[in-house]
Amino acid sequence: MIYMNLFYVLAGVLFILGLKKLSHPKTARNGNLTASIGMLIAIVVTLVTFGNLDFRMIAIGMIIGSIIGAFFAIKVQMTEMPQMVAIFNGFGGGASALVAAADFLKNAQHLMNGDMIMVGSFEISPIFYGAVVAFSIFVGTLTFTGSFVAFGKLQGFISGQPVVFMGQKILNAVMALVIIVSIVMMAVPGSIDLNLLFIIIVVVSAFLGITLTIPIGGADMPVVISLLNSYSGIAAAATGFVLLNQGLIISGALVGASGLILTNIMCKGMNRSLANVIFGAVGGVVEGAAAAIQKLNIKSYSTEEAAMIFDAADKIIIVPGYGLAVAQAQHAAREIADFLESKGKKVLYAIHPVAGRMPGHMNVLLAEANVPYELLKDLDEINPEFEDCDVALVLGANDVVNPAARHDKSSPIYGMPILNVDKSRTVIINKRTMNPGFAGIQNELFGFDNSIMVFGDAKVMLTQLLADLKDL
Amino acid sequence: MIDVITIFVLAIFIGFEVITKVPPTLHTPLMSGSNAISGIAIVGAIISTQAGGSIGTWLGLIAIIFATINVVGGFLVTDRMLKMFKRK
């Protein structure tokens, strides 16, 4: 048993080293391999140390899981990565909840009698055990259903718009209260049947996962996915406390911390608090938006006219947004950039932290299209570059380039750090239609004197633009 | 008991230290990679098959399937992504 924990620590060390190597693209792939070796060690040690395991069951489960996991991993398109991560978060949380549930069912009788609980070779107080097992089931189940709602929204099974109903916040508050009371009652059992309490926790947690995720709209998804990522780690750590397993505790803590950091970065990228994202339900129709559209003086150009502007430019910055992912236009964007570079022009990419539907979404898409990662610049790096930029090409991004965030105190996105594309000599904006962005607000940028709209699907537009550029 | 809490707290601090150094370009692989690590629940799932015969074993089986999807899928897709990140 002592040796077993040494191996779990070794696995933990490999996870940490693996994450450390993720600090640079050059070493990142090796880091992923390092972490997977850690996982292999943890699994093998568990298999050889614990007696009485049902190897047939384990083999069946691992084979089925491997086939499904590998199938998803190989088939998924890079544009679908957010929903892939969402659903994997769900499986992780679900697994933790199931493990805690199985352990609870094993010990329910002892817990009800108020006996000490045997965990491995340790005797654990039923108060501690009851609280952590209930908490573990709660977080795991919440992660499971919340992730599936997030998946459904990203995949388009459920409306990407915030779904709000009367009394939603009160309902959530009541359910949260039920959970807290249930956790306490699990730790200090009174007259209530613990099996019934267990069912209450599962059902309410599952429901709470749904009602907490469903009001959150598409562009807030980066926050939700990061948060669910963190929950899946917390669930694993909580299950680690149930089983007093160091492997689970270390890894769960690492993942929990990782998710929290990303959540924080995403919130900062939108200048919103986490509470505001979860309970704010921004979006839908904002009054006055329709009137504002008419005030904008919009210039719509053909790709041919746009091509001439590119031809005269020396420095071009491409600003990708979710629209690029939807149109699968990453390769087309890269081809344009290649052509412009071959003409001796400088091309850079500006990546806003919340562009797309998950942290780093745009970076992965552009990496897929073979754009070298040195050309992808984050907010602080790229904003000074717009000052002497000839053309900023905005592809399916909207709120992250809205200058209202800088000056309009009444705007819902006021204070959000934005890409200062309007400082460029010319801004060429590609959108499918004039529909306002996710936040439901009109973008004054579209009416600026130096702004030009080129309407159409990003991929179709870029392909046409490239043809026109070659014809010049 | 205090031991495991100590481990937990220290691991969180290490996590914060290491992960703040990951550049935004790699945030998606970081998520899918850490996702694979949260598949560590597989260790708990394996142990839960000890219960034997009862409903607990079946929960254990589903847990193994879920966690394996996470581990195998997570590491594979992360590798697939990281393979694409190239220099000029």
Image (tube, grey):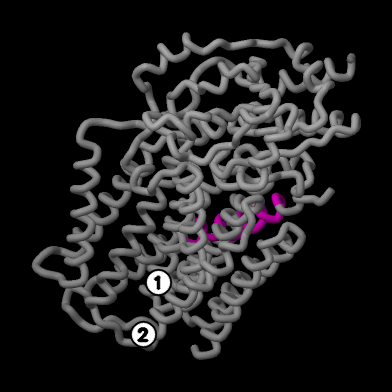
| Chain containing mark 2 | B
The amino acid marked with disc number 1 is Gly
Q: Earlier in the sequence, mark 2 or mark 1?
A: 2
Quarter of the rendering occupied by the C terminus of chain A: top right
Residue that carries the numbered disc 1 in the rendered image:
B52
Q: Is residue B72 magenta?
A: yes
Categorize mark 2 by other alpha carbons within 10 Å: few (<14), some (14-19), many (20+). Answer: few
The residue positioned 61% from the left and 50% from the top of the image is: B28
Q: Is residue A213 magenta?
A: no
**Tag of residue B2:** 2
Q: Secondary structure at mark 1?
A: loop
The residue positioned 65% from the left and 33% from the top of the image is: A320
Q: Is residue A283 above or below residue A188?
A: above
A404 or A275: nearer the viewer: A404
A86 or A308: nearer the viewer: A308
The residue positioned 75% from the left and 28% from the top of the image is: A390
Magenta region: B63-81
| Chain containing mark 1 | B
